[in-house]
Image: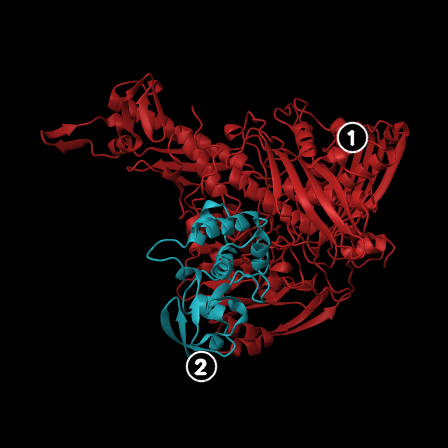
Chain colours: A red, B cyan
Amino acid sequence: MTQSIIGKSVPRPDAFDKVTGGKGYPVNIKLPGMLHGKILRSPYPHAKILNVDTRAAEQLPGVKAVLVPADCPKRKYTTVYFVPTDALSMVQDMLVMSDTVRYAGQPVAAVAATSVAIAEAALELIDVEYEELPCVFDPEQAMAPGAPQLHEHAQNNIAVNPEMEFGDLDAGFAEADHIFEGVYTTQRVHTCYMEPRVCVVDAEANGNMTVHSSMQHLFGLRQKLAYVLEIPESRVRVIKPPYIGGGFGGKLDIGYIEPIAALLSRQANRPVRIEQTRYEDFITTARHPIKVYLKTGVKKDGTFTARYAKSILDTGAHATHGAEVINVHGMFGFFLTYRCANRKWEGYSVYTNNMVGGGFRGYGSPQACFAVESQIDEICDELELDPVEFRRKNAHHQGDPHPFLQGMKLDSYAFDECLVRGAEQIGFAGRGRPNADDGHKKRGVGLACQPLWVSGCLGFPDIYEHSGAIIKLNPDGTADLNTAVMDLGSGQITTLCQIAAEGLGLPMEAVRITETADTTTVPFDAPSHASRVTYASGTVVLAAARVVRQRLLEVAGVMLEVSAEDLEVSAGTISVKGSPDTTLTVAEVVQRAESPYIQVGDEGPAPTTVEEKGTIIGLASSAPAGNPSPAAVGFVAVEVDTETGHVQVERVVYAHDLGKVINPNAAEGQVEGGVQQGIGYALMEDLQFEENSGACLTADFLDYKILTAVEMPRKIESIFIESDEPTGPFGAKSLSEPCITVPAPAIANAIYNAIGVRIRELPITPEKILAALGKL
Amino acid sequence: MKKLIRLNVNGDDHELAVSPDETLLGVLRGPLDLIGPKRGCDSGGCGCCTVQVDGKAVYSCMMYAVSAQGRDIITIEGIGRDGELDPLQQAFIDAGAVQCGYCTSGIIMVAKELLNTLDNPDEDEIRHAIAGNLCRCTGYQKIVDAIKLAAAAS
């Protein structure tokens, strides 16, 4: 089949609507009789709630429902969408509202009223009596004897404590010529989706519930909400919004707002909408801070002999994603990245009185990559080894056994090519020594790798992986693709339509995604997360397209009195192989399939055939065949001002093996956005909290800084390497996450190359640079 | 105590009773049912709510509705003519500058002011013009490309 749509930068089908206002965002949903909910949040980071007096609030005109912890269900759950609610690999420690407060900002009461202003006024009238408890904000202090205990089930506040071991670590260190040790710390950062978390829940008196929400997973929300409320899943209908205003992993779990809105709606017998303020968003989800103790043994020539890491993750008041991030961090950020005969990793996900962490692109990998890739450069510097060659030497290579999935191989894995082509493009071989420049502005070049990442999560315990799609042809020759996949902005609508169009033999503009889907009409699909949609959902969309194509050719075969095997379809036209003049349009075939059995023509009634009748529709639902690993390498050039400590990233060259590019423009857009988030992580972003009260100090965009167009490098140079993954749709693997992972260590390495100073703590602020230079 | 005001939005006059502390954004998204201006932070930090007031790009979350009386307010819904897209809207589609799209309306409104002021802005002028608008998806690269494309087209 000639590939005509794959690899083309076709425009996004959703772009027209978005440039004219954007009807599809969940934030726009208004229902008749809708009330507005607001949440009262604890000012204390650790306290017992002794009493909640809501009498005055209930008396306020316009208040229709008031919720306190005593009104809420008592079944504990995990919020994370991509696992079953009671998954044994996770920790069930959440309640909609608890009478123990474990972080400043935890919901303690809620109100639904006829306006936002009345709801806010009612919150002021609620009187909560607290008994303050001792707090702990540092995870290592939380693990120490005598620390305040947050949860009865977690001794020393340790939520989970996974370990991995391979080979003989002691023997590996004994074999080493050199041993390197370092401690690398990362901060708490926010995904900064632009559309706030928002939901509208309509709990009808008959027990059915309709839910609109800005989220990354229809079925996860349905399942979690049903579990929390202890009602059958089929009672909860989650409506798929056409798109949402960003997610980046930050909308990968049920929030407080959905169950609270549901309970308020039940009470008031009216729909309830809750939209979070930006402050509430900032304290709802974050990438977890992780402290990594890293110890590595190497031979003189740079071969790893032993790798050991201990990672301490601050999960905050509840485990949620912290029970899983720690594993992905250890596995894909450290344990599997490079070949080494002797490895050990231990992870601690630790409760503190900080805000609860969440999902964020990279999911544990950025924290590990910062440690691993920084230390590799320290080793190379000390042993005078080439950082590119060092990584190549220790990496997995194409054709090697898959280090994670037993019995599989790295069939497509162009890591070496990423290294070589990226190094060449940025001119890595020609980089200077630290402080080579005259004057106070010094330039440096650095690199970092994400050697082994995932396309989905196949092989991880308890994680949903299967996808589903329905494709239906219309009498005008177009196709409707119906799927539960959420487009967070990263272009899933576009790439899935391209895959469907190519599989069907239709032009791109003939395929559209159905906008009216909900959990009663579409097959299950795992969340839009883990770089999985193009690979996993794309595979299923292609399978559904092939079912439809087969039926299309069967009907055409009846019409043309030839076998379906003798037909082909391309760009909406069906032709007989070898006789290009004998053609039918897809529209003609669908019209025939959808037509009455006996058709009345000029010559009277004439029967057609039964074989050609019926809507041409196809369904596929399956889990992917593998977990093919993309590989990525990022190179940066920086300029460091040694007078001000300011770091300007001047160039970014990012090389990524994604198997096959479905849409080059969309792929570049992914990388450019990921790099913005990665540079922010490296240099400026930091969710900060007041030391004793735990109050958020960076609760708006004036205090929480992300890069603007001015601070960004003028061009992000993407190099896409197409290694043609045999199991992927048209050879595709995945793209989304490594581009956010590699900038921070690459920048730290480039800063070292510029000024000879090693910063092991993110973000690398001007203050830290000046302090390291002895100027503060 | 509500106050009766008259607002001209996208060429239409509206008479509205608003509280003195109601923002322009609140009125646009509320009683006027316009969805183009977005609430992203409600504190003048993100730019998703940007509209034009008398030809100047303004954060509508930072302006009281009562202050907008007698002024010419244009939202993304009010640009483009006779069913045709504004060249900036078309350029955002063509350049692939739209991802989640939540920032798009605001950035187009800022870019519109820029292109009304400068015929052929250079890269730095474009980047500084949109520096008050945050985007988390695109890294701004294709947004800058789109504004260049629109400038070249007009």
Quadrant holding the C terminus of chain A:
bottom right
> In the image, is residue A656 above or below residue A112?
above
SS under mark 1? helix
**Chain letter of disc 2 in the image:** B
Identified at 19% across, 27% down, the residue is: A608
Q: Position of residue A713 (x, y in %)?
A: 64, 48
Quadrant holding the N terminus of chain A:
top left
Q: Position of residue A479 (x, y in %)?
A: 36, 37
Q: Residue furthest top?
A: A578
Amino acid type of disc 1? Phe
Does residue A114 appear in the picture of this structure? yes
User: How many badges with numbers are in the image?
Assistant: 2
Amino acid type of disc 2? Lys
The front one of A284 and B153 is B153
The front one of A743 and A613 is A743
Q: Position of residue B113 (x, y in %)?
A: 49, 62
Q: Position of residue A351 (x, y in %)?
A: 74, 54
CA–CA distance between discs 1 and 2?
71 Å
Q: Identify the residue position indicated by label 1 in the image.
A: A390
Q: Identify the residue position indicated by label 2 in the image.
A: B3
Q: Are marks 1 and 2 on the same chain?
A: no
**Chain letter of disc 1 in the image:** A
SS under mark 2? strand
Q: Is residue A727 left or right of residue B54?
A: right
Q: Is residue A28 left or right of residue A650?
A: left
Q: Estimate how packed mark 1 is, as few (under 14), some (14 to 19) or many (20 or more) residues with alpha carbons within 10 Å.
A: some
